[in-house]
Image: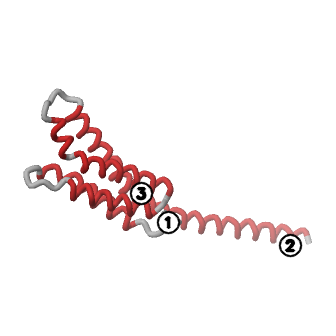
Amino acid sequence: MAHQNKYLERKNEIDKSLDEIQHSEMTQNESKEVRYTSGLLSVAFYLSTIYLVLFISLFALSDIGWGFVVLIFLGPNLLSLAIGAFLLRLGMKRRNKTLLYASIGLYLLSIILAFDPDWEIFRIAPIVLGILVLIGTLLVKDEKSY
């Protein structure tokens, strides 16, 4: 009788360890996917933050007189980019795909607002950031899996 109890206890321990191993393998596979997509969104967020800080500090805080003129003309672009970055961060933290879609819309709006035939150089960063956010959001499968 004692031998059977030891056998059953040992069998239960083995079953528990097998369940833990299977659960950890599934968690590792899911975490790689989540890490990749959230990494793409994090890169987009930090690049847009760096772009905004460098852009504003270059033109607003320097002694360049025409810097404020550039900020006035690109103000709507920078504002939509800043709001899009804010919504992107909220969507990443709250794991809300609706906020991520709203940030895609604002990044696309910043691409449209940066359109000026004379200043083509200012369209590059919003296009790259918009593509990163779009790909990162589309790779997120579900609100619960992200």
Task: State whether residue 47 appears in this view.
Answer: no
Q: Is residue 107 above or below residue 12?
A: above
Q: Which mark is residue 4?
A: 2
* In the image: residue 28, left or right of residue 65: right
Disc on the earlier residue, 3 or 1: 3
N-terminal of the two: label 2 or label 1?
2
Give the residue type at disc 2.
Answer: Gln
Task: Please name the residue shown 48% across and 53% down the image.
Answer: 93
**Structural distance between the alpha carbons of marks 2 and 1:** 47 Å
Decide which of 29, 123 is in the foreground and name it.
123
Q: Residues within 10 Å of mark 1 (few under 14, many from 20)?
A: few
Residues at marks 3 and 1, CA–CA distance in whole angstroms = 12 Å
In front: label 2 or label 1? 1
Task: Name the residue type under label 1.
Answer: Glu
Picture coordinates of residue 78, whole percent (x, y): 26, 47
Q: Which residue is mark 3?
A: 38
Q: Earlier in the sequence, mark 3 or mark 2?
A: 2
Which residue bears the numbered disc 1? 143
CB under 8 Å between discs 2 and 1? no
Residue appearing at x 51%, y 62% in the figure: 28
Q: How many other residues sit within 10 Å of disc 2, few (<14), some (14-19) or many (≥20)?
A: few
For the residue pair 56 and 12, the one nearer the viewer reads as 56
Q: Is residue 108 above or below residue 65?
A: below
Is the residue under label 2 in contact with that under label 3 (CB below 8 Å)? no
Q: CA distance from mark 3 to mark 2?
A: 50 Å
Residue 33: percent from left, percent from top: 44, 64
Q: Residue at x 36, y 57 (%)?
A: 40
Looking at the image, the residue that sits furthest to the left is 118
Name the quadrant containing residue 21: bottom right
